[in-house]
Image (tube, helix red, strand yellow):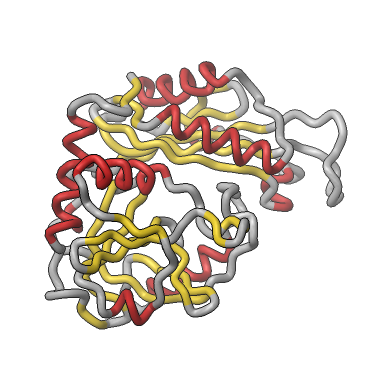
């Protein structure tokens, strides 16, 4: 069965979706996107997703193209039409179609596109063995609080990591790790979780990851110490454990950085415990939206 996507008010087979070459998302990367996990046919963390998308749209000066509840209803309809049991739904909103010019055009309607993707979120096979990451240069723009569709910097960095047989790149700026190309980065020392704060000196430093926020809430509830501060590559290489979080997998242990083993080279106890607690929370129905 061919995948059904949403394109500006219509549900169509993916090979029938059409977008103008004058869409500002295509010409300028002028838009925002979101990814929401789906488990057992249900949206997860949808309210948090809406809040973050609202922040991104406000930062870009793009008006909501529909009511929030209609936006969620569209996601649910994609789940039904595609019989999606587990995976993600990607959605993006661009400023719209207009003659190419840098200033915002007048009287333009935002364009909405969304599609589902089936994947293993809960039982990701890499969770048991962990993944390798490579350190890459931070190339992104300064508004990292906006989930922009302009992802060329992340594409280049992720490709650099892939060419070195790594699953992810952790970006380094001013000799400190910010986050992954498409994930939030964490290390663990003496049982304490260390991760970068959202802002440093009033400037957005990393994307406000939804799974990152949930994991920090779980850690607080479980009495696991957390330090919100930048950490260096040297500290990461000497850490007891490392892990990363994202919508597509929840949490994955990191067992190798730049070819060097982290800890004993296996997923550590804090990462394992957090991952178990994270998915137990989902099974219990918290943060789920049917």
x then y, percent, for residue 246: 36, 50
x then y, percent, for residue 78: 42, 25
Badge count: 0
166 w.r.t. 25: above or below: below
x then y, percent, for residue 155: 51, 64
Residue 165 in which image quadrant:
bottom left
**Residue nearest the viewer, comparing 113 with 63:** 63
Quarter of the rendering occupied by the C terminus: top left
104 displayed left or right of 134: right
Quarter of the rendering occupied by the N terminus: top left
274 displayed left or right of 168: left
Residue 255 in which image quadrant:
bottom left
270 displayed left or right of 159: left
**Residue nearest the viewer, comparing 243 with 225:** 225
202 w.r.t. 161: above or below: above
Q: What residue is rendered at 60% in x and 49% in y?
A: 148
Q: What residue is rendered at 76% in x and 44% in y?
A: 22
x then y, percent, for residue 266: 13, 68
Q: What residue is rendered at 40% in x and 21% in y?
A: 76
212 w.r.t. 155: above or below: above
Q: What residue is rendered at 59% in x and 18% in y?
A: 67
């Amino acid at each position: 069965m061919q995948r059904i996507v949403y394109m500006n008010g219509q549900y169509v087979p993916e090979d029938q979706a059409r977008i103008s070459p004058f869409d500002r998302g295509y010409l300028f990367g002028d838009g925002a996107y979101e990814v929401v996990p789906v488990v057992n046919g249900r949206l997860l963390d949808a309210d948090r997703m809406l809040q973050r998308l609202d922040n991104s749209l406000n930062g870009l000066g793009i008006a909501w193209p529909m009511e929030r509840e209609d936006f969620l209803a569209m996601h649910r309809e994609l789940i039904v039409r595609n019989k999606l049991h587990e995976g993600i739904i990607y959605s993006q909103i661009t400023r719209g179609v207009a003659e190419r010019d840098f200033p915002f055009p007048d009287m333009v309607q935002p364009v909405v596109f969304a599609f589902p993707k089936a994947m293993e979120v809960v039982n990701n096979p890499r969770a048991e063995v962990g993944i390798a990451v490579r350190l890459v240069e931070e190339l992104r723009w300064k508004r990292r609080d906006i989930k922009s569709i302009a992802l060329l910097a992340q594409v280049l960095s992720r490709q650099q990591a892939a060419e070195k047989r790594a699953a992810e790149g952790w970006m380094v700026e001013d000799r400190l790790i910010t986050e992954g190309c498409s994930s939030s980065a964490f290390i663990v020392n003496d049982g304490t979780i260390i991760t970068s704060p959202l802002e440093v000196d009033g400037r957005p430093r990393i994307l406000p990851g939804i799974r990152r926020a949930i994991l920090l809430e779980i850690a607080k509830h479980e009495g696991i110490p957390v330090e919100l501060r930048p950490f260096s590559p040297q500290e990461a290489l000497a850490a007891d454990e490392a892990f990363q979080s994202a919508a597509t997998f929840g949490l994955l242990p990191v067992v190798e950085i730049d070819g060097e083993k982290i800890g004993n080279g296996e997923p550590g106890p804090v990462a394992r415990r957090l991952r178990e607690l994270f998915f137990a929370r989902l099974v219990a129905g918290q943060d789920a939206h049917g």
